[in-house]
Image (cartoon, rainbow, N blue to C red):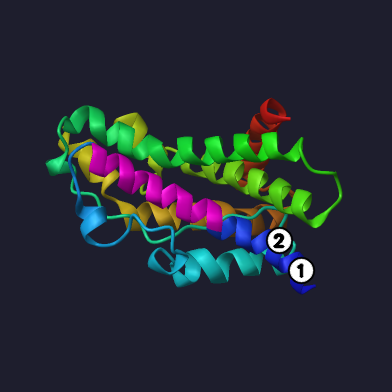
């Protein structure tokens, strides 16, 4: 039981930490050292853990057999006004986490060819690859505060778009509603469909097919 939890939970933590550190490194490269000054370029998970998003939510999804697993860490602080080329660099910083997750998934796919199938190490690598892909697909959603919203609209100085990108609380509530409340409502009227899980599942399976 403990081994099963570890080979599923530790990959979640690794993927989330790599995602956030990538944001910080690219922001630093583009001129903003805020993440460096706050000690957020470290691979130490304790510097990035969000109690609910990194621990409680993944464990709840794991033990409830929800059919999908995701989470988040504390966002790396970025001062977008300090970037060398804000309109371009905001997109680079936002995309960095997704790209880092996909690169790590690719490394896992390569490593899997070197180890026998069925062992604990191969199971660990499979879980790490899958969660990196799921995290990349999740963050590609164009909903604030996720990276997809900044990649799609981060270059704009339109005040309405800026307000949309800063609507973190509204975006988080939308994600919670889509992931947990909407499926319950649909089930209550006889529709067994979870649109959020369907998006994560279909997008992740497509990317996984490219790696394997």
Is residue 172 shown left or right of residue 127? left
Is residue 200 shown left or right of residue 153? right
User: Which quadrant of the structure image shows residue 2?
Assistant: bottom right
Is residue 156 shown left or right of residue 41? left
> Which part of the image, by quadrant, shows the N terminus?
bottom right
Is residue 80 shown left or right of residue 125? left
User: Which quadrant of the structure image shows residue 56?
Assistant: bottom right
Q: What is the tally of numbered marks visible in this picture?
A: 2
> Which part of the image, by quadrant, shows the C terminus?
top right
Determine the secondary structure under disc 1: helix
Q: Quickly name the residue at label 1.
A: 3
Residue 166 falls within the magenta-colored stretch:
no
Counting other residues with Cα less than 10 Å from the Cα at mark 1, is it few (<14), some (14-19), or many (20 or more)? few
Determine the secondary structure under disc 2: helix
Picture coordinates of residue 58, whole percent (x, y): 60, 64
The answer to whether marks 2 and 1 mark residues whose Cβ atoms lie closer than 8 Å is yes
Q: Give the magenta part as a residue range.
A: 14-29
Residue 28 falls within the magenta-colored stretch:
yes
Q: Main secondary structure of the magenta part?
A: helix
Counting other residues with Cα less than 10 Å from the Cα at mark 2, is it few (<14), some (14-19), or many (20 or more)? some
User: What numbered label is drawn on residue 7?
Assistant: 2
Picture coordinates of residue 29, whole percent (x, y): 25, 38
């Amino acid at each position: 039981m403990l081994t099963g939890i570890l080979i599923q939970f530790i990959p979640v933590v690794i993927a989330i930490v790599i995602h956030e550190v990538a944001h910080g490194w690219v922001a630093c490269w583009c001129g903003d050292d805020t993440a460096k000054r706050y000690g957020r370029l470290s691979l130490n998970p304790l510097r990035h853990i969000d109690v609910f998003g990194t621990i409680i939510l993944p464990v709840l999804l794991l033990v409830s057999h929800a059919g999908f697993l995701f989470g988040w860490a504390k966002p790396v602080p970025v001062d977008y006004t300090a970037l060398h080329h804000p309109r371009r660099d905001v997109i680079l910083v936002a995309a960095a986490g997704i790209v880092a997750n996909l690169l790590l998934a690719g490394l896992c796919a390569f490593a899997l060819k070197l180890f026998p199938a069925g062992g604990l190490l191969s199971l660990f690598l499979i879980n790490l690859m899958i969660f990196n892909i799921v995290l990349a697909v999740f963050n590609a959603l164009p909903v604030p505060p996720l990276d997809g919203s900044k990649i799609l609209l981060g270059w704009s100085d339109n005040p309405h778009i800026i307000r949309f990108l800063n609507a973190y609380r509204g975006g988080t509530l939308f994600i919670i509603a889509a992931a947990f409340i909407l499926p319950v409502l649909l089930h209550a009227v006889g529709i067994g469909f979870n649109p959020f899980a369907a998006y994560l599942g279909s997008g992740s399976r497509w990317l996984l097919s490219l790696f394997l």
